[in-house]
Image (cartoon, rainbow, N blue to C red):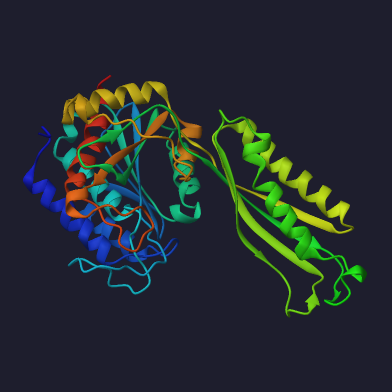
């Protein structure tokens, strides 16, 4: 039993989550979402600063010790499927990654902590971040925290449908990968499809580049240092009997260490140039630096394990493998000590089995009180230590 159980708070958080689920907004356009957040903060007389129309940071308490709690607010451009009563009302937009729950839990924690504000032994910031799905929103919040003199700890939660309800992962070390992209323009010499000997076929070059660069993790990087190189787009040409002048490749790579992150970027450039040169073509390679690894600091992990044990018992602590998916909470843990917790939201018996970004994605709403409790209690425990 969660000793934090509070039926009134649970109902509040569930209703909020359903509101946000019914009214999702895509990255960078979370205007109504932010207005709702502000109205809830005002309802409970919680101070906040509006950084821009989609970004709000609120705070409670006073003191030298400071912790920032972060929740992301954006939805995905996805058509929701299913027949749940709170299905998206915005056609083609869906909260398919749990951010609706993140907003609701963070507001629930703010509401709870407001009631006991006088007992806080420091300052708690509540950071409502937009545009996470496209890697945005973090810089503005981190700049604001810098102006406030910085914080001592950052803490985020991600509801996770592939972790069972009442289980929580707060393991230390790399938890989500560096996420970077690349684009390759292959320049050949076009001509008639009947005379390939008179051409430099960029599609052939691009195909060979694709095969070689996606083999980098198995051929060039240590098997003890997980990495992935993937290609999502390869295109070029206008007709079946015309060899084009140019072809294009777009993809990404995920890593967990700084060394492999740098090495893979350089290898993509080197391999692409070598293959193009061998075939008489040229390439233009752009490495697009994305988000850093979400790294859970050891001291934060130990603190979180104590908090989880206090809330749900030691049996709730769940070991979950690092994810090759990326999350820009990595910008926070790159700058400050902290942790991202993965709160179990799956329930096979109730059919809540679909992964994130799936049109049938959903969460067990009992996870919302677990997350609200974890936000609140972790902040309390941190400020007391």
Work out whether residue 248 or residue 258 is closer to the camera in this orientation and state it.
248
The quarter in which the N terminus is drawn is top left
Asked whether the viewer can see residue 44, the reply is no
Q: Position of residue 127 (x, y in %)?
A: 36, 45
Can you name the residue that lies furthest to the left here?
A: 7
What residue do we see at 29% from left, 55% from top? 100
The quarter in which the C terminus is drawn is top left
In the image, is 25 to the left or to the right of 104? right
The answer to whether residue 158 is above or below residue 307 is below
Q: Position of residue 231 (x, y in %)?
A: 61, 55
Q: Quadrant of residue 298?
A: top left
Work out whether residue 55 or residue 49 is closer to the camera in this orientation and state it.
55
In the image, is 66 to the left or to the right of 381? right
The answer to whether residue 39 is above or below residue 218 is below
What residue do we see at 33% from left, 30% from top? 319
The answer to whether residue 232 is above or below residue 291 is below
In the image, is 27 to the left or to the right of 187? left
Asked whether the viewer can see residue 319, the reply is yes
Work out whether residue 382 or residue 322 is closer to the camera in this orientation and state it.
322
């Amino acid at each position: 039993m969660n000793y934090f159980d509070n039926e009134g708070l649970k109902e509040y958080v569930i209703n909020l989550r359903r509101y946000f689920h019914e009214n999702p907004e895509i990255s960078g356009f979370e205007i109504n979402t932010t207005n709702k957040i502000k109205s809830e903060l005002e309802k409970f007389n919680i101070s906040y600063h509006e950084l821009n129309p989609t970004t709000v940071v609120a705070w409670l308490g006073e003191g030298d010790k400071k912790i920032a709690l972060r929740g992301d607010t954006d939805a995905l451009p996805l058509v929701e499927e299913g027949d749940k009563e709170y299905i998206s009302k915005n056609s083609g937009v869906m909260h398919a990654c749990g951010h609706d729950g993140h907003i609701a839990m963070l507001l629930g924690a703010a509401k709870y902590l407001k009631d006991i504000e006088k007992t806080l032994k420091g300052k708690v910031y509540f950071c409502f971040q937009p545009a996470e799905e496209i890697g945005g929103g973090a810089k503005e919040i981190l700049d604001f925290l810098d102006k406030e003199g910085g914080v001592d700890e950052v803490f985020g939660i991600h509801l996770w449908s592939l972790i069972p309800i009442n289980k929580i992962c707060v393991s230390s070390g790399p938890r989500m990968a560096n996420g970077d992209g690349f684009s390759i323009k292959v320049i050949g010499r076009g001509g008639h499809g009947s005379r390939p000997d008179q051409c430099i076929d960029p599609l052939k070059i691009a195909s060979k580049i694709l095969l070689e660069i996606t083999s980098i993790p198995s051929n060039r990087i240590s098997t003890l240092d997980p990495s992935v190189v993937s290609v999502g787009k390869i295109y070029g040409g206008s007709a079946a009997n015309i060899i084009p002048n140019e072809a294009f490749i777009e993809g990404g790579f995920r890593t967990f260490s700084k060394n492999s992150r740098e090495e893979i970027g350089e290898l993509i450039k080197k391999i692409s140039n070598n293959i193009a040169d061998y075939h008489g073509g040229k390439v233009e390679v752009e490495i697009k630096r994305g988000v850093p690894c979400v790294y859970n600091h050891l001291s934060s992990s130990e603190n979180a394990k104590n908090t989880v044990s206090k809330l749900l018992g030691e049996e709730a602590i769940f070991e979950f493998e690092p994810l090759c998916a990326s999350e820009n909470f990595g910008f926070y843990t790159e700058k400050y000590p902290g942790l991202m917790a993965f709160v179990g939201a799956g329930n096979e018996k109730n059919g809540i089995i679909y992964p994130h970004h799936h049109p049938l994605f959903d969460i067990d709403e009992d996870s919302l009180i677990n997350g609200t409790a974890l936000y609140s209690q972790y902040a309390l425990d941190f400020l007391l230590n």
